[in-house]
C-alpha cells in the first residue's frame, strides 16, 4: 500500500482528455505536455475513477519525469523526487500555503552528496491528505520604508515570493488559470534561509517521494547550492508497505 501526504486535484485535471472521434474504442488518448497517455474509461467523479486516473498518470510520469537533481530542468517540466522533507506553513495570512523543504546544509551529508542541490516545493493546504504541517515563524514579509511608523509599508523580497506563490494556489482553488509565479532568486534564497533557521520548529524530516512541476531553478550563488523550486502533484512516504 502507498501512503500519500499530498495530491493536487488541479494538476491531475490537467491530464484529462477531450472527446475525440479518433480514439480507439475502450481507451482514451490523453495529450499531455509529456506526450500521449492511454487511459481506460471509468466513471468520472467517483473515488475509484480518481484513484484509477492517479495510478495511470503516476505510471506515465514514471517514464517521463526527470530526477530533480539532474541538470537541465526547465520551468514547466515535470520532475520526480525522493528526499527527506519537512512540511510547514507560515504564521500569518498565508497559512493556506504549504511548503516542503529539504534538510538544512550539513544536516544530511549523504543526501547532499547524492543530489548536489536543494529542493523547495510549494502547494496548497487543501491538497494535504490528513497530514498536519508544522506552523512556524517565517521571514519578515513586510518592512517600513524609512524605519518609522509613518513610513510606507513594502513587501520584502521574501514577501514578494510568498505572495506570488500564494496567489498561484488561490487562483487554482478558484478554478481559474493560475498566474505564473514571479519568483526572484534573492527572495527565494531569503525564504529558504529563514526556513533553515527555524527547522527545529518543524521537527524531523521524513523521507518522501513524488512528482512535481518545475517552477524555477536557481543556479549556485554565494556558496549556496543550486535550488530547485517546484509545485507537487503527489507527495507520499518513501518506504515500502505491505
Image (cartoon, rainbow, N blue to C red):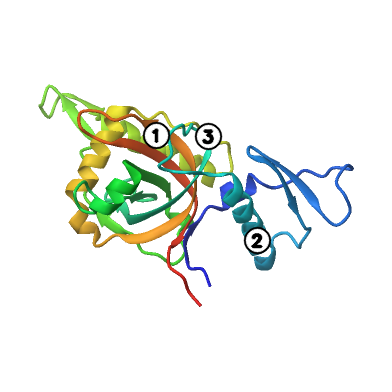
Q: Nearer the viewer, mark 3 or mark 2?
A: 3
| Point 32% across, 31% down: residue | 160
Residue named by callout 2: 50
Residue nearer the viewer, 107 or 121: 107
| Vertical side of 156 occupied by 105: above or below | below
- Could you tell me which secondary element the residue under label 3 belongs to? loop
| Point 46% across, 61% down: residue | 236
Specify the label residue 164 is tagged with: 1
Q: Nearer the viewer, mark 2 or mark 1?
A: 2
Specify the label residue 76 is tagged with: 3
Q: Residues within 10 Å of mark 3 (few under 14, many from 20)?
A: some
- Could you tell me which secondary element the residue under label 1 belongs to? helix
Residue nearer the viewer, 170 or 87: 87
- Could you tell me which secondary element the residue under label 2 belongs to? helix
Q: How many marks?
A: 3
Earlier in the chain: of badge 3 and badge 1, it is 3
- Whether residues under marks 2 and 1 lie with C-beta atoms below 8 angstroms apart, the answer is no
- Whether residues under marks 3 and 2 lie with C-beta atoms below 8 angstroms apart, the answer is no
| Vertical side of 129 occupied by 226: above or below | above
Is residue 129 toward the left or the right of residue 83 in the image?
A: right
| Percent coordinates x, y for residue 42 in the rendering | 76, 61
Earlier in the chain: of badge 2 and badge 1, it is 2
Q: Residues within 10 Å of mark 2 (few under 14, many from 20)?
A: some
| Percent coordinates x, y for residue 134 in the rendering | 29, 59
Q: Nearer the viewer, mark 3 or mark 1?
A: 3
Q: CA distance from mark 2 to mark 1?
A: 29 Å
| Percent coordinates x, y for residue 140 in the rendering | 20, 38
Amino acid at each position: 500500500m502507498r501512503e500519500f501526504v499530498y495530491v493536487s486535484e488541479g494538476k491531475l485535471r490537467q491530464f484529462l482528455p477531450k472527446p475525440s472521434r479518433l480514439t480507439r474504442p475502450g481507451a482514451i488518448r490523453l495529450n499531455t505536455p509529456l506526450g500521449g497517455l492511454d487511459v481506460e474509461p471509468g466513471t468520472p467523479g467517483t473515488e475509484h475513477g480518481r484513484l484509477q486516473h492517479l495510478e495511470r498518470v503516476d505510471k506515465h510520469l514514471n517514464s517521463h519525469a526527470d530526477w530533480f537533481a539532474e541538470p537541465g530542468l526547465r520551468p514547466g517540466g515535470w520532475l520526480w523526487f525522493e528526499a527527506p522533507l519537512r512540511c510547514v506553513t507560515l504564521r500569518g495570512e498565508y497559512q493556506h500555503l504549504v511548503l516542503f523543504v529539504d534538510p538544512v546544509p550539513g544536516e544530511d551529508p549523504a543526501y547532499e552528496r547524492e543530489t548536489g542541490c536543494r529542493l523547495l516545493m510549494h502547494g496548497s493546504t487543501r491538497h494535504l491528505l490528513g497530514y498536519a504541517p508544522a506552523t512556524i515563524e517565517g521571514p519578515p514579509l513586510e518592512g517600513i520604508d524609512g524605519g518609522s511608523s509613518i513610513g510606507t509599508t513594502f513587501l520584502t523580497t521574501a514577501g514578494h515570493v510568498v505572495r506570488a506563490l500564494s496567489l498561484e494556489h488561490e487562483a487554482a482553488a478558484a478554478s481559474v488559470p493560475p498566474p505564473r509565479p514571479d519568483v526572484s532568486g534573492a527572495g527565494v534564497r531569503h525564504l529558504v534561509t529563514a526556513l533553515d533557521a527555524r527547522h527545529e520548529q518543524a521537527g524531523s524530516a521524513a523521507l518522501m517521494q513524488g512528482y512535481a512541476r518545475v517552477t524555477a531553478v536557481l543556479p549556485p550563488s554565494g556558496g549556496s547550492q543550486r535550488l530547485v523550486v517546484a509545485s507537487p502533484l503527489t507527495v507520499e512516504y518513501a518506504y515500502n508497505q505491505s
